[in-house]
Structure formats: C-alpha cells, structure tokens
Image (cartoon, helix red, strand yellow):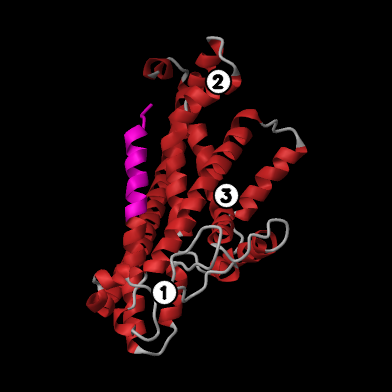
Amino acid sequence: MANSFLNLPGRAQFAAAGAGLAVQNRFASEGAKGKVANTLFLALMLLALTIAITAIVAILAWAFVEGRTRLDLDLIFNGPSTVKRATAGYSVAILGTLQIIGGVIALIIPLGVGAALYLEQFADKTKWWNRVIEVNIQNLAGVPSIVFGILGLAFFVRGPFSWGLVAASGSATVALLVLPTVILASREAIKAVPPSILEGSLALGATRWQAVWRQVLPAAAPGMLTGVILAVSRAIGEAAPLLLVGALTFVTFAPNFFDGGYSALPVLIYNYAGRPQEEFQILAAAGVLLMLAVLIVINSFAIWLRARYERTW
C-alpha cells in the first residue's frame, strides 16, 4: 500500500497525506474521548457493584448479629407459636415453602421450555398471534407480584379452578409470576446453540421435532437451568402474592398440597418482624438466615445439574 501511495502524482500525494493526517487526528481525538468514557463507565459500574455488595453484607451481618441466639435445631423443627416464643420455629413454613417451590418447578419447566421451543423453532414470526404472545411475555416480566396474587385469587382460589386456600393455589400463582423469566432465559439458551447442529440433523433425515428434541434441547439445557435457578431464587422470597392466596401465618400442622392451610417462610418472617416482642424480632432475623440457607441448598443442586450437562462450542 505504501508503494502505491508513492506512485501517485505529487499533488495527489499531498492530498492523500493531508486526508490521512485529518483522519488520524479525528480518530485520536475520538479514541481519547472513548477511553475517558470507558473509564468513567467502568468506575460507575464498580461503584454500583460495591454499593450492592455492601448492602447485602450489611443485611446479612445484621441478621446474624440479631438472630445468632436462635440458630439452633428448634428453629428448624419447631412450629410457630405465640405462647412459647423462646422456642418457636419455622418447621411448618419450611414444609410449605418446599411444597410451593416443588410445584413451581414442576410447572415452569414444561411450560417455560415448551413455550421457548415453540417460539424459537416452530412459530411463524409473520403471524400476528405469535407476535402478540412475544409482546405479552416481555410485558409480564415487569408486572408487580401483587397483580399475580389477585390473578391467583380470581382463578385458582375461586373462579374456574376453585382449589381454595391451599398450597397448590400458591404454587400456581408464583409459577405464573416467574414463568416469563424461564421463557426468556430458555429462548436465549436455544439461540446460543449453533444452527449447524439442527441443520445437520435435518440433513441426515430427522424430522424437525426429532432434531429439536434430541439435539437442540439437550444442548440448551444448561442455559435453561440458569433461568430456572433465577426463577426459583425469586419465587422463594415472594410474600405479596401468597398473602392473597391463603399463606396463613400461624399454621401448627403439616400442610397438604391440595387440602388445608399452609404457610411460607417469607410470610412468617414478615409477620414475626411486625410484632413488638423482642423474641419475635430475634426470630425474624434468624428466619432470614434460614431462608437464605434453604435457597442456597436448592440453587446448589440446580447449579450442579447445570455444570454436569454444560457444553462448550
């Protein structure tokens, strides 16, 4: 390229040199501004991350300092009580939370994965109803949780299903709340699978369903599990929708999924924190640590599954 530049006539050489110098100065100026902008953006992100981590550590430290005296087996195996406040626990709420989360997982995996597969592999993007479905899924991800509680009260507790104030109603309500998260994460996981895998299966004579079921779905499973982990992390801490669908506070018996009352950890913690007695305040702080421990156990199992089946392309 330098030789071709030297072969130019004299005036052309001067013109090309001037243009090259102008371009060089322009990019040097923009490069300096870009470096400043990148440095400023990185500093702001680190500041936001520091504030978030500091807040989380402060809350956990407060919960540990306040509730350390109640970190015992009574906290896990005893039920709620207004009389024996010093030995009250969360056993009933733990069972209720596990039942709710189990029902949520059983609903969001087939519904979320099925919706993602349909939208990414089978839906005709030119049809208006498919566009309506996509817009609604994106909008539902930002709807407040209390709205889903009203929806669950209208459809699951009463309305067409009429299950009543049982754990199944709470589980279905929370599943609808976190379902958009699973669908969006599953769609991104499917997009991340190389198209050559699907095309190779089709070229070998497999039907589209066989190629999706046996090749695309297993390859996208680790990414889909990420969406399930995020959904469960949100579901386990939701209290507002459960208050509307029957998560009673003081249930002294083991809950049944389709019969009788139930409670959940966030609801019981909220109730304890609102009581003036010091024993309940300590119990609420200990409950925060207990709920965090339950969340870590559930997510650890999901993360282990994701790591076991994760693939690199």
Which marked residue is nearer to the observer: mark 3 or mark 2?
Answer: 2
How far separated are the C-alphas under marks 3 and 2? 26 Å
Picture coordinates of residue 175 (x, y %)? Answer: 55, 53
> Label 1 sits on what residue type?
Ile
Question: Is residue 8 at least partly visible in the picture?
Answer: yes
Report the disc number at residue 180.
3
How far separated are the C-alphas under marks 1 and 2? 48 Å
Q: Is residue 193 left or right of residue 142?
A: left
| Residues at circles 3 and 2 in contact by the CB criterion of under 8 Å | no
**Of the residues under marks 1 and 3, which one precedes in the sequence?**
3
| Residues at circles 1 and 3 in contact by the CB criterion of under 8 Å | no
Residue 4 covered by magenta stretch: no
Question: Is residue 21 at least partly visible in the picture?
Answer: no
Residue on which the image places disc 1 = 269
Residue on which the image places disc 2 = 210
Q: Which residues are magenta?
A: 297-313
> Label 2 sits on what residue type?
Gln
Residue shown at 33% from the left, 84% from the top: 84
Picture coordinates of residue 120 (x, y %)? Answer: 60, 33
How far separated are the C-alphas under marks 1 and 3? 27 Å
| Quarter of the image where one finds residue 170 | bottom right
* Foreground of the two, 79 or 124: 79
Picture coordinates of residue 116 (x, y %)? Answer: 58, 38
Other-residue count near label 2 (Cα within 10 Å), few / some / many at <14 / 14–19 / ≥20: some
* Foreground of the two, 183 or 281: 281
**Of the residues under marks 3 and 2, which one precedes in the sequence?**
3
Quadrant of the frame with the N terminus: top left
Which marked residue is nearer to the observer: mark 1 or mark 3?
Answer: 1
> Label 3 sits on what residue type?
Pro
Q: Mark 2: which secondary structure? A: helix
